[in-house]
Amino acid sequence: MLVRFHSALCDEEDAASLPAEESPLVKVISQQNADGSWSPSDDLEAQLGLKPQEIGQSLPRQDMDLTLWVTILAVIWLHASCADSKDEWELLVDKSVSWIKANSGPDLGGCVKAANDLLKTSVNPHVFGL
């Protein structure tokens, strides 16, 4: 009896230790940096539904920092694709928006429009305080 019980416990423990398939939301938010930004990566690009190299080729300004652009795209994606889970990411996005405002310069509205165009979304610029 003890052997069966122990065996059943081991099976449950083994199953619990297997990694669960992460949702796209978890995959995106787990890549956020401590300062609220996101760094460019192939994995993030794929999670946002973009083709390889598309983020780098779609910069709205030639002099724009790629990390700033990726962070704007991630915030827009979260608003457009994960609105039903907003309570899970809202504070993360607040931190991101603060980081974006501190690093964006004068044309944040144009960048938000370009990001909406690229992601084929219509997130209101007011989420960036515009």
Image (cartoon, rainbow, N blue to C red):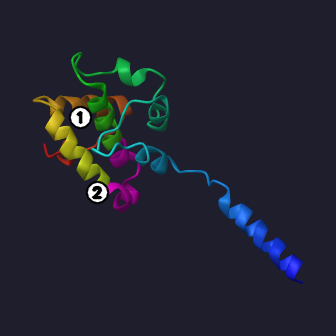
Inspect the magenta stretch and tell me whether residue 9 lies in it: no
Horizontal placement of 105 versus 56: left or right?
left
Residue type, numbered disc 2: Leu
Which residue sits at x=35%, y=40%?
Answer: 74
Classify mark 1: helix, strand or loop.
Answer: helix
Mark 1 surroundings within 10 Å by alpha-carbon count, few (fewer than 14), some (14 through 19), many (20 or more):
many
* Rendering coords of residue 51 (x, y %): 48, 25
Mark 2 surroundings within 10 Å by alpha-carbon count, few (fewer than 14), some (14 through 19), many (20 or more):
few
Which residue matches tag 1? 112
Q: Which residues are magenta?
A: 77-90
* Rendering coords of residue 100 (x, y %): 21, 39
Q: Nearer the viewer, mark 1 or mark 2?
A: 2
Classify mark 2: helix, strand or loop.
Answer: helix
Where residue 6 sits, quadrant-wise, is bottom right
Which residue matches tag 2? 91
Where residue 114 sits, quadrant-wise, is top left
